[in-house]
Image (spheres, grey):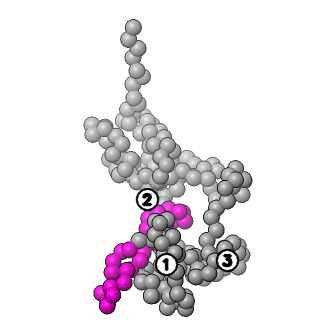
């Protein structure tokens, strides 16, 4: 007895492309760009990038009043819980988010706002030395990378942020970083819990 497998939905059929894209993004463990989504289709059925972008915009609109949103970050699009629901969702997970030292956060902020910068530049701005462990931690988390080497004696590394940094902090581009004034106001309103590690 031969059992026929159900036919795969065709992207060209009414509304199916949108459903397929929604399912792909939902199932993905990482953000996906329209180009990455396009490559998941067979050559003969690949939709145009503009078609994918149109369907993504429609999906975003579908979720506008729901606790889940389709969010664009630097690496692409991902589904996530809206920020307003984080106090309840956070209780689902026993593991607490890692605490970062003020020195690490200051170093990361300087790189984000002043990039590309050398370790020496960071030390000049902070007024204290930057430990190797801080730079190593940021590199290991893939929040920063070496983008070039400065053409001065010793050729020190120039550091910049990565797409993963933008993804982690829910940003689409560096232009979405809050202004320094907004950061100061945020710290006054919501003091950041940091560990007591030194520089």
Q: CB under 8 Å between callouts 3 and 2?
A: no
* Left or right: 23, with 85 as reference point: left
Q: Residue at x 51, y 45 (%)?
A: 26
Instruction: Residue 62: tell me if it is visible.
Output: yes
In this rendered view, identify the residue nearer to me: 111 or 99: 99
Sequence order check: which comes first, mark 3 or mark 2? 2
Sequence order check: which comes first, mark 1 or mark 3? 1
Q: Can you give x and y, in whole percent of width and height, for residue 114 in the image?
A: 46, 82
- Residue ranking furthest to the left: 44
Magenta range is: 146-174
Cα separation between marks 2 and 1 = 28 Å
Residue pointed to by mark 1? 132
* Left or right: 16, with 87 as reference point: left
Q: Residue at x 39, y 25 (%)?
A: 7
Q: Residue at x 49, y 43 (%)?
A: 27
Residue pointed to by mark 3? 196
């Amino acid at each position: 007895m031969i059992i026929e497998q159900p036919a795969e939905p065709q992207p060209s059929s009414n509304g199916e492309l949108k459903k397929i894209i929604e399912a792909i993004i939902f199932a993905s463990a990482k953000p996906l760009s329209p180009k990455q989504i396009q490559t998941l289709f067979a050559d003969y059925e690949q939709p145009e990038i503009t078609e994918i972008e149109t369907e993504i915009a429609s999906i975003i609109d579908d979720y506008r009043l729901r606790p889940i949103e389709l969010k664009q970050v630097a690496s692409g699009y991902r589904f996530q819980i809206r920020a307003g629901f984080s106090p309840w969702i956070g209780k689902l997970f026993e593991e607490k988010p890692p605490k970062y030292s003020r020195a690490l956060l200051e170093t990361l902020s300087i790189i984000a706002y002043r990039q590309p910068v050398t370790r020496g530049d960071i030390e000049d701005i902070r007024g204290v030395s930057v430990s190797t462990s801080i730079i190593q931690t940021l590199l290991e988390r893939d929040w920063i990378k070496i983008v070039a080497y400065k053409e001065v004696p010793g050729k020190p590394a120039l550091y910049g942020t990565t797409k993963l940094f933008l993804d982690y902090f829910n940003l689409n581009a560096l232009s979405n970083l809050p202004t320094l004034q907004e950061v100061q106001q945020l710290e006054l309103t919501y003091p950041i819990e940091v560990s007591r590690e030194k520089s």
